[in-house]
Image (tube, rainbow, N blue to C red):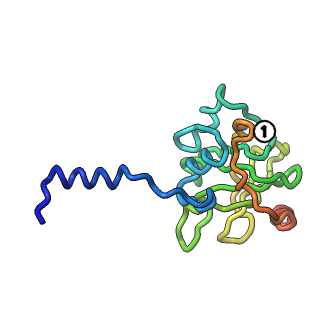
Amino acid sequence: MFVTASRRFGLILALFAAPLPAAASILDYVGQCVPFARAASGVQIYGDAWTWWDQAEGRYPRGHAPRIGAVVAFARSDKLRLGHVAVVSRIVEKRVLMLTHANWSREDGRRGFVEQDVTLFDVSPDNDWSQVRVWYKGVTGLGGSTYAVHGFIYGPKGASTPQLSARQPDYVGSLIDAYAQ
C-alpha cells in the first residue's frame, strides 16, 4: 500500500498526540526527580533541581524544619551536578525523617525508580538539616556521602499526594539506619 508523505506525517503526529496511559500510582513513576517531586508535592517549579530553592523564593514558603509533603532541595555538588529534590513522607524524630523520591538508587543497574519512605538523616553540626545522609539501595543503608541541603520548600496545604508514605513504614529500620553506623 502506498502512503503519501503527508499521510505518513499525519500518522506520526497522531501517535505523538495520543495521551499516555495514566500510572496506577505515583509510585509507578519512572524518570527524573523533578517531575516526581512536582507531582507528589504540588510545588509547581520547573527546571533543574539545583534551581528550585532560588525559584521558590517569593512563590512558596521556605525553611529549615521538615514538614510532611515539603520538598527537600539538595544543593548542586560534584556528585549531584543537577542537584536533587525529594518529598518528606514521614518525620521519625528530630534528626531522622523519611522521604519519597525518584531517580536515586539503582535498580537492576538503572536509575529513575521511585523509592518510598527512605531514611534521611540530618548530620549537620547545628542540627539544621543543612547536611544530610540518604538511604541508598545499593548498600541497603545510608550511603557514605554527605549532601548539602538548601532547606525545605513548603507546597500548598493539602496538595501532596497521600501515596507518599506506606501504611506501615519501618520507623525502627529508619532509626537503625541513622544511628547504628
Percent coordinates x, y for residue 94 in the rendering: 88, 49
Left or right of 81? Residue 170 is right
Residue closer to the observer: 34 or 9:
9
Does 137 appear above or below 151?
A: below
Looking at the picture, how far across and down is residue 6, in whole percent? Answer: 16, 49
How crowded pointer 1 is (Cα within 10 Å; few <14, some 14-19, many 20+) is rated as some
Count of residue discs: 1
In the image, 106 versus 19, the foreground residue is 19
Q: Residue furthest top?
A: 58
Quadrant that contains the N terminus: bottom left
Please name the residue shown 52% across and 40% down the image: 47
Please give the name of the residue rendered at 70% of the width and 38% of the height, measured from the top-left corner. 155
Towards the viewer: 8 or 56: 8
The residue tagged 1 is 64
Circle 1 sits in a helix, a strand or a loop, which is it? loop
Residue at the far bottom in the pictured view: 108
Q: Position of residue 131 (x, y in %)?
A: 75, 48
| Amino acid type, mark 1 | His
Q: From the viewer's perspective, is residue 47 above or below residue 140?
A: above
Point 53% across, 68% down: residue: 110
Q: Quadrant of residue 104?
A: bottom right
- Give percent across and percent down for residue 171: 85, 63
- Would residue 67 be visible to someone looking at this image? yes
